[in-house]
Image: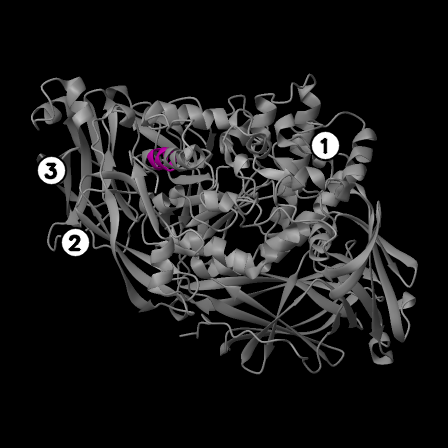
């Protein structure tokens, strides 16, 4: 058995004898601007907004109206300067390069006052030969950034024809022409983002080296490298399972950068972990291609019995192995370590059939799902936006871990990285590998048309080559998607285009002829789609732009409807895969108070709230959905803003819950129209880039909203759910994704009827079910009228619906252990129900003890004198997480756990802990 490396020991790199020489140029720099004249210390990696805030030149840009107040920053030109020393030994190498892992975005680079290159794409690694411009001793480096706003406008003016949209909607409060340049698309403003068009040396590379028997990690952003003939740039390693399943062929592609002689030569050694039996040796002596690159490919064969497979979260373990590549050249040793997961993954788009007339079989569309290691996977997760609107901060390891830990703890197995952001840091994908989070990787194109001239396409080619080679070896990567929404934008003519032919040709030239070709050249086994939402293979059959932009029988669906009843499952489509959907809510008061100190700003109708609400009519949509379902809050109440924020989170959480469970209820089954076999639900969105009304489940401060707590349950491996089919029929479903349960596990689904005024069910109906991990099971179709009337809920059905509600439990029929989270369904809108005004109190808090890393755990006992809805606990300024929140309390006593992120005492928690619930007379 090959030894797995599941724990990586991280050390500061102090030097490795006989290796490629590098010299880090990051750290303290100087940055200066002219409008006004500013010269301050700067940090590399970093960005101009971060540097200005750190030096006190501007206030916190995320506070108050900072996005408007500091737009001048993006209009100035900024110059970053530093000095460094090199010795004769360094300069004696044949090639000396300066390497930038990320320049945002338009920069001119100078060494000792001499221009050595320019940049125009923040997603590309730039390498410039500087040997002739360096001297032994001290040298100067300068990076002059142009205003991205000004450059984008200049590019737009010089295009042969308009590339829409020129500007974002007024509500975005952004700037124009971001789709003409290769920069984070949301940095000019978006429906969930402020406009902060930053500049800076922003991106960090994590280098892996083996030092004796330990893995060594060190981070660089801008650095010098010195070598004589060649250097390893990328290693793309892809395990491919043989047809027999007896062994894996690891396809290894090594990409070498070359020096002045244009050749790569040396000896290569590759082995898997410390298993010498897997070791292969090969030589290389080849000339570079037109890209100044040499490609050397080879295979390594590994017995299937000697490795364990990598599985998505919830399906098995995330087994990882170290592929160690050593390159020896000119008495120099260079080593790269790639962490491999052995798994197969396929996007399945097969014919879907239903029974027709006269015993015939009719084809009704195509499937759209991911199959990992031969098992169909229901994609459960969310869309992510940039981890921060300032790209350098998105690489903060604590931020990255918090995002991915949230996904794992929420029972997610997939995240979609939206095309409005950035390709995430190495650490992000490493953690996704460790946590079993599949990545639906959008390329950074979204909600716009894009140029397709030769200059733009060549720029994109460099971006794709770099990013795909960087990411391709990660087992977490499930899909490469070329863009977000652009097929739909063209087909539905979002931008009122007259000459559709030209833009259709541009679309194919960019996403098919260029991007698809480049990806498959590097990674032939890649799962690739040209857009999302898309009709999948059907779109490809119609030149990648299907006349029916959203057909639930094909591909994936993006669905947003803010005006229909979001608590009615009939509102939602029945797709093959739901790749984006969601509703807005407000962050908590404590989160808002990090963005403003003016209490008047918290009024939902204030100018400040309007400024932060970027979705057109967004607050009206929230208000209307509240009014549809819940008792209207009194706008004259001094706590109105607090009630409104709480109600908005109820609406969001319950809406996304109902929509997600609707999608899960169609797993492995079709309706009469052939719709269904739904195999994915990725709501939008997981995270935030500022404190504002958005679609997120976790706000910018890291605080979980009610939606995030709900996701733990609606993404549970096994759920029981129900929906009203019409006014008098309720269908109950049990859905399982748990392949670890024994086949034909027998469970009992209990359907209870509760009267609002009693903790004791007035009726209970058990249903015995055999769990099936391949499809949702319709447990029962229940006549709700008969059930409620026979449960003494009222003499008339309309009255009975207001007096009672349904409650669902799923227990193991043998040991009565709960198999799934409990669930509920309201037969009437809550504002019309006769809910008693319960009094919920915290009656006991006891410390469980230290959890890990100095955090603390507590038991919190809640007592109520009546059924309480959406019970919400809040520890306010104490960072932490409850085991559940926003729940229905149908028992007198309930115990919830709280885990703090810092060491606190019981008294600390008691002093700040509050609880509220729907219909609470006073929001506590």
Q: Main secondary structure of the magenta part?
A: helix
Number of dots carrying numbers: 3
The quarter of the image holding the N terminus is: bottom left
The percent position of residue 709, horizontal first and vertical second, equals 36, 46
Between 830 and 420, the residue placed more toward the observer is 830
Where, by quadrant of the figure, is residue 179 drawn?
Answer: top right
**Disc 2 or disc 3, which is closer to the eye?**
3
Pointer 1 and pointer 2: residues touching (CB < 8 Å)? no
Task: Give the labeled residue for mark 1.
Answer: 176
Which residue position is annotated with label 2?
A: 817
Res. 551 visible in picture: no
User: Quick check: marks 1 and 3 in contact, CB under 8 Å?
Assistant: no
In the rendered image, residue 884 lying in the magenta stretch gets the answer no
Q: Earlier in the sequence, mark 2 or mark 3?
A: 3
**Relative to 216, is 57 above or below?**
above
The mark that comes first in sequence, 1 or 2, is 1
In this rendering, the answer to whether 508 lies above or below 415 is above
**CA separation, marks 2 and 3?**
19 Å
Pointer 3 residue = 761
Q: Residues within 10 Å of mark 2 (few under 14, many from 20)?
A: few
Mark 1–mark 3 distance (CA, rounded to whole Å): 59 Å
Left or right placement of residue 202 versus residue 446 in this view = right
Mark 2: which secondary structure?
loop
* Part of the protein shown in magenta: 653-659
Q: Please name whichever residue, 328 or 791, is drawn nearer the observer in this view of the structure.
A: 791
């Amino acid at each position: 058995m090959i030894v797995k490396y599941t724990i990586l020991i991280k050390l500061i790199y102090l030097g490795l004898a006989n290796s490629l020489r590098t010299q880090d140029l990051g750290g303290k720099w100087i940055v200066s601007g002219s409008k006004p004249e500013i010269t301050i210390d700067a940090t590399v990696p970093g960005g101009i907004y971060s540097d200005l805030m750190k030096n006190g030149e501007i206030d916190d840009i995320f506070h108050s109206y900072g996005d408007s107040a500091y737009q001048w920053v993006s209009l100035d030109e900024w110059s970053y300067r530093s000095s460094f020393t090199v010795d004769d030994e360094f300069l004696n190498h044949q090639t000396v390069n300066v390497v930038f892992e990320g320049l945002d975005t338009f920069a001119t680079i100078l060494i000792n006052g001499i221009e050595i290159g320019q940049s125009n794409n923040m997603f590309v690694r730039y390498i410039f030969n500087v040997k002739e411009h360096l001297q032994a001793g001290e040298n100067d480096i300068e990076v002059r950034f142009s205003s991205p706003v000004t450059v984008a406008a200049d590019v737009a003016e010089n295009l042969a024809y308009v590339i829409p949209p020129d500007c974002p909607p007024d509500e975005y409060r952004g700037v124009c022409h971001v789709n003409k340049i290769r920069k984070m698309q949301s940095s000019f403003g978006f429906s969930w983002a402020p406009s902060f068009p930053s500049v800076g040396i922003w991106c960090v590379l994590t280098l892996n080296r083996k030092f004796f028997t330990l893995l060594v990690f060190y981070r660089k952003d801008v650095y010098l490298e010195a070598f004589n003939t060649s250097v390893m740039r990328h290693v793309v390693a892809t395990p491919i399972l043989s047809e027999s399943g007896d062994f894996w062929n690891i396809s290894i592609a090594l990409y070498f950068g070359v020096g002045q002689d244009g050749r790569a030569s040396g000896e290569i050694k590759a082995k898997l972990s410390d298993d010498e039996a897997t070791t292969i040796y090969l030589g290389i002596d080849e000339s570079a291609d037109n890209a100044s690159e040499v490609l050397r490919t080879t295979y390594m064969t590994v017995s299937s019995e000697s490795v364990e497979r990598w599985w998505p979260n919830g399906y098995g373990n995330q087994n990882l192995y170290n592929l160690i590549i050593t390159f020896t050249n000119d008495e120099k040793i260079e080593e790269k370590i790639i962490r491999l997961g052995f798994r197969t993954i396929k996007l399945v788009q097969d014919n879907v059939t239903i029974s027709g007339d006269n015993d015939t079989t009719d084809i009704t569309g195509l499937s759209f799902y991911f199959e990992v290691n031969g098992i169909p996977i229901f994609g459960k997760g969310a869309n992510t936006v940039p981890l921060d609107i300032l790209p350098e901060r998105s690489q903060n390891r604590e931020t990255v871990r918090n995002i991915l830990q949230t996904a794992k703890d929420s029972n997610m197995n997939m995240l979609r990285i939206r095309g409005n952001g950035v390709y995430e840091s190495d650490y992000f994908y490493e953690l996704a590998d460790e946590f079993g989070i599949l990545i639906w990787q959008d390329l950074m194109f979204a909600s716009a048309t894009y140029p397709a001239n030769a200059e733009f396409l060549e720029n994109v080619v460099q971006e794709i080559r770099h990013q795909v080679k960087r990411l391709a070896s990660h087992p977490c990567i499930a899909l490469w998607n070329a863009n977000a929404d652009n097929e739909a934008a063209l087909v539905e003519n979002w931008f009122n285009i007259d000459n559709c032919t030209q833009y259709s040709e541009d679309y194919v030239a960019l996403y098919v002829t260029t991007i698809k070709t480049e990806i498959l050249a590097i990674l032939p086994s890649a799962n690739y789609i040209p857009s999302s939402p898309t009709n999948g293979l059907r779109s490809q059959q119609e030149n990648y732009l299907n006349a029916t932009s959203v057909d639930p029988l094909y591909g994936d669906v993006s669905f947003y409807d803010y005006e229909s009843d979001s608590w009615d499952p009939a509102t939602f489509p029945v797709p093959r895969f739901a790749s984006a959907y969601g509703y807005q809510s407000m962050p908590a008061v404590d989160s808002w108070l990090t963005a403003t100190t003016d209490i008047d700003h918290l009024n939902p109708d204030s100018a400040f709230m309007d400024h932060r609400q970027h979705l057109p009519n967004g607050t009206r949509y929230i208000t209307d959905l509240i009014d549809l379902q819940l008792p209207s809050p009194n706008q004259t109440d001094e706590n109105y803003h607090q009630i409104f924020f709480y109600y908005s989170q109820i609406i969001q959480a319950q809406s996304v819950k109902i929509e997600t469970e609707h999608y899960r209820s169609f797993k492995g089954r079709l309706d009469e129209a052939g719709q269904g076999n739904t195999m994915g639900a990725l709501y939008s969105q997981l995270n935030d880039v500022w404190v504002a009304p958005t679609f997120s489940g976790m706000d910018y401060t890291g605080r979980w909203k009610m939606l995030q707590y709900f996701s733990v349950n609606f993404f549970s491996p096994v759920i029981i759910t129900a929906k009203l089919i019409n006014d008098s029929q309720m269908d109950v479903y049990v859905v399982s994704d748990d392949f670890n349960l024994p086949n034909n596990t027998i469970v009992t689904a209990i359907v209870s009827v509760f009267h609002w005024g009693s903790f004791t069910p007035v009726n209970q109906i058990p249903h015995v079910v055999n769990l099936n991990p391949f499809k949702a099971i319709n447990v029962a179709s229940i006549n709700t009228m008969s059930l409620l009337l026979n449960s003494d809920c009222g003499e008339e059905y309309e009255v009975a619906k207001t007096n009672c509600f349904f409650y669902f439990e799923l227990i193991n029929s043998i040991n009565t252990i709960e198999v799934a989270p409990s669930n509920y369904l309201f037969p009437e809108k809550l504002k019309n129900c006769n809910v008693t005004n319960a009094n919920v109190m915290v009656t006991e808090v006891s410390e469980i003890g230290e959890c890990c890393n100095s955090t603390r755990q507590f038991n919190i006992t809640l007592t109520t004198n009546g059924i309480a809805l959406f019970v919400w606990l809040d520890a306010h300024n104490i960072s932490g997480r409850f085991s559940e929140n926003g729940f229905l309390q149908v028992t007198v006593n309930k115990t919830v756990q709280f885990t703090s992120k810092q060491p606190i005492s019981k008294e600390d928690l008691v002093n700040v802990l509050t609880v509220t619930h729907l219909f609470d007379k006073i929001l506590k």
